[in-house]
Image: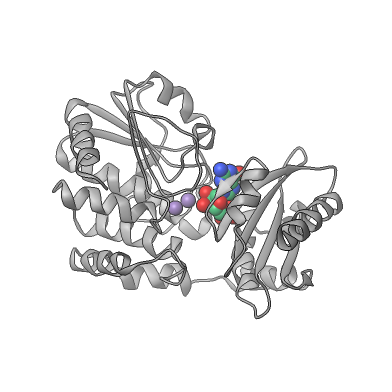
């Protein structure tokens, strides 16, 4: 992050009395961690700051500290609006109306190829997590931090890097993790809740999805219907872990999970391991993301058609 970006950030928050923060719809650990940590730091700095709730929170994230601050906004315009963990206005869903009325706007993000223009864009697509960027801002501007803020930032770092595994991590990521632990991040609480707390019923659901996977090296493809979720009394979000499991298999470069939503919408999740740029596939289909994790929506008559479309898209991308 450049010195001039930091100076501008400081100027914009100092000028603002009230600040709204929004992350992308269906927030993940990084989106929630970045927005809630920044909110609390700004509040301790003396601002009225709120995180705007635009989605239900998936069950696996309900352990989040300070989650009660992800809530309906109390104002309909703010002096400053900060978008975190996405670079597209339409990914903040209905918060866009509040954003448009607000005086100034900032984006802090690490996604590739987003088209957005605000008063201050802090966008580094090499960064493994928005939380790493938020921590750098807090640290260099000497904004307040406490053990809860550190824990929130730590969650974003751990989830977006796949527990410090993915290719976009750097020395800085480990240094950031160390500094966050030093600031009181409760990593045992985080690990226990994220990785050692799975319901057996969820394992059975995953097991069922895994039994439906189409393996066609180097890709693996599977669809999850609304009916499958109903049959197992699960949320669609409970299927998401499967795409990472498939990507991790020997001989599989790219894994694709199709999730059925309402009105013919099929949400595609893509994960790759070594050489396929899935963010390109996503951008070509009006979505986005990172080289190794990206997504977009398809609109199809039924799951069979969605699977067929994905077979074609994957084959083309692999042969390219
Ligand atoms: P996931 O597969 O976990 O839903 O998403 C993986 C990555 O792709 C995330 O970084 C997410 O922000 C991005 N992504 C997923 N769906 C979409 C989409 O519809 N549009 C855009 N721009 N990005 C998406
Ligand atoms: Mn995210
Ligand atoms: Mn992220």
Total labels: the figure holds: 0
Residue 275 in which image quadrant:
bottom right
Left or right for 98, reference 200:
left
Residue 227 higher or lower than 102, as above or below: below
Nearest to the observer: residue 107 or residue 314: 314
Q: Is residue 144 visible?
A: no
Locate residue 314, reporting x and y percent.
Answer: 74, 58
Q: Quadrant of the C terminus?
A: bottom right
Q: Which residue in the rendered view is the most extreme toward the front?
A: 320
Left or right for 262, reference 115:
right
Residue 23 in which image quadrant:
top left
Locate residue 69, reporting x and y percent.
Answer: 35, 43
Locate residue 1, reporting x and y percent.
Answer: 27, 48
Q: Is residue 215 visible?
A: yes
Nearest to the observer: residue 316 or residue 54: 316
Q: Which residue in the rendered view is the most extreme toward the bottom?
A: 250
Q: Residue at (65%, 81%) from the top-left corner? A: 250
Residue 17 higher or lower than 283, as above or below: above
Q: Residue at (37%, 51%) from the top-left corner? A: 130
Locate residue 304, reporting x and y percent.
Answer: 86, 53
Nearest to the observer: residue 78 or residue 281: 281
């Amino acid at each position: 992050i450049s010195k001039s970006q930091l100076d501008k950030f400081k100027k914009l928050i100092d000028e603002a009395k009230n600040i709204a923060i929004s992350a992308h719809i269906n927030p993940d650990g990084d989106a929630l961690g970045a927005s809630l940590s920044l909110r609390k730091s700004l509040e301790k700095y003396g601002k009225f700051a709120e995180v705007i709730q635009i989605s239900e929170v998936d069950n696996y994230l309900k352990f989040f500290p300070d989650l009660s601050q992800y809530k309906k906004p109390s104002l309909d315009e703010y002096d400053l609006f900060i978008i975190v963990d996405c670079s597209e206005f339409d990914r903040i869903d209905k918060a866009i109306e509040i954003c448009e009325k607000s005086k100034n706007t900032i984006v802090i993000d690490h996604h590739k190829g987003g088209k957005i223009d605000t008063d201050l864009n802090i966008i580094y697509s090499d960064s493994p997590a928005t939380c790493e960027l938020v921590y750098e801002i807090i640290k260099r501007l000497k904004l307040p931090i406490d053990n809860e803020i550190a824990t929130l930032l730590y969650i974003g770092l751990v989830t977006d890097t796949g527990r410090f595994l993915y290719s976009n991590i750097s020395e800085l990521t480990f240094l950031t993790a160390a500094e966050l632990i030093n600031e009181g991040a409760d990593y045992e609480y985080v690990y226990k809740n994220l990785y050692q707390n799975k319901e057996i019923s969820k394992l059975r659901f995953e097991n069922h999805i895994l039994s439906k996977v189409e393996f066609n090296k180097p890709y693996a493809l599977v669809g999850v219907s609304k009916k499958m979720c109903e049959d197992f009394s699960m949320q669609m979000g409970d299927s998401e872990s499967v795409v990472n499991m498939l990507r991790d298999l020997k001989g599989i470069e790219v894994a694709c999970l199709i999730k059925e939503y309402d009105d013919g919408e099929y949400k595609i999740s893509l994960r790759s391991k070594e050489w396929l740029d899935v963010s390109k596939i996503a951008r070509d289909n009006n979505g986005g993301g990172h080289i190794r994790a990206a997504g977009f929506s398809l609109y199809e008559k039924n799951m069979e058609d969605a699977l067929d479309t994905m077979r074609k898209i994957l084959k083309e991308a692999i042969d390219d």
